[in-house]
Image: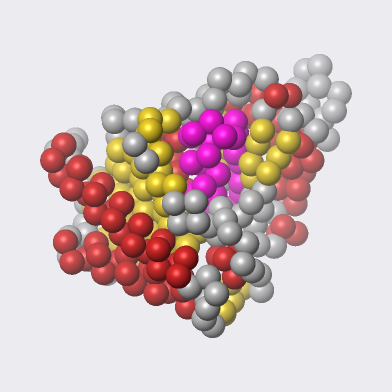
Amino acid sequence: MKEISARLQRRLLSLAMEAATTAGEFIVSRQRDIGTITFKSARNPVTETDLQAEHRIIGAIKRVFPDHLVISEESGAGKNESEFVWWIDPLDGTTNFSHGYPHFAVSIALEYRGKLQLGVVYDPVRQELFRATRGNGSYLGRRHIRVSPVKSLLRALMSTGFPYDPRSHPRALKIFSRIVTRTQGVRRDGSAALNLCYLAAGRFDGFWEIGLKPWDTAAGVVILEEAGGRVTDLEGKRFEIREGDVLASNRLLHRQLLNAVRVNQHPKGDKRCA
């Protein structure tokens, strides 16, 4: 398969970083005036700020690469066919943002011929820019980042998220009850993109969630894998961004986490199984 040239890769990364930071700065400027809030479902909000930030990101990409396909959370997919597919979440953590809780991010990823090539996640509140390109490692600002060396679940700090209606996914609650009793702690902070980046930076040791969308995970997966982490589905199979269920770790904990999330199985010697 033909690869993206190093020169083009740098150009694409620069574009993604600029688009993410510009959108993030706009989002922060709207924290006290988020505009109208509507709901895509009973618990799934979207604000005017989401839409305007998305418009800025798509415009920045299309001005430089008008033939690229852009798929975004709020606007969906364009009509053109392309080997280059951008996955955009203009505001990952809209519920947090709409309540004034300062934990959200802009997430931008690029897929080329079915393979994720780069990821950028920008936290505009902390002004932290996570980025990675295939084969070149992961960075927070100018600092190279790696996953943690934690080897025991009992010493692991985990992160997760829940579907907007947890009742529709009872397995999610069962998995949570199993992992929270086996680890040092579990955090649920409302941004899958940042969860994956925090795992890449060693702040978390593992992450899982059910029912995510490609724009939630695409950028974070690149950043995590380039930082030495591992991503699969909940059964340990190859993770596909279009499938939605994700289990991620610092690699050292992956087998233990797979055993913990298998709610219908009883690993040998584990008397705590549900």
Give the number of callouts: 0
**Residue 234 seen in the current view:** no
Give me the residue at 53% from left, 70% from top: 31
Answer left or right for 21 relative to 43.
Answer: left
Of residues 79 and 38, the one nearer the viewer is 38
**Residue 34 seen in the current view:** yes
* Quarter of the rendering containing residue 255: top right
Give me the residue at 35% from left, 57% from top: 21
Give me the residue at 56% from left, 53% from top: 191
Image: 249 above or below 95: above
Residue 221 at x, y = what percent? 44, 40
Question: What span is in magenta?
Answer: 192-215
Of residues 230 and 52, the one nearer the viewer is 52
Give me the residue at 25% from left, 65% from top: 60
Residue 271 belongs to the span the image colors magenta: no
Residue 14 at x, y = what percent? 24, 49
Q: What quarter of the picture does the C terminus occupy?
A: top right
Residue 170 at x, y = what percent? 75, 51
Residue 4 at x, y = what percent? 17, 40
Answer left or right for 128 relative to 101.
Answer: left
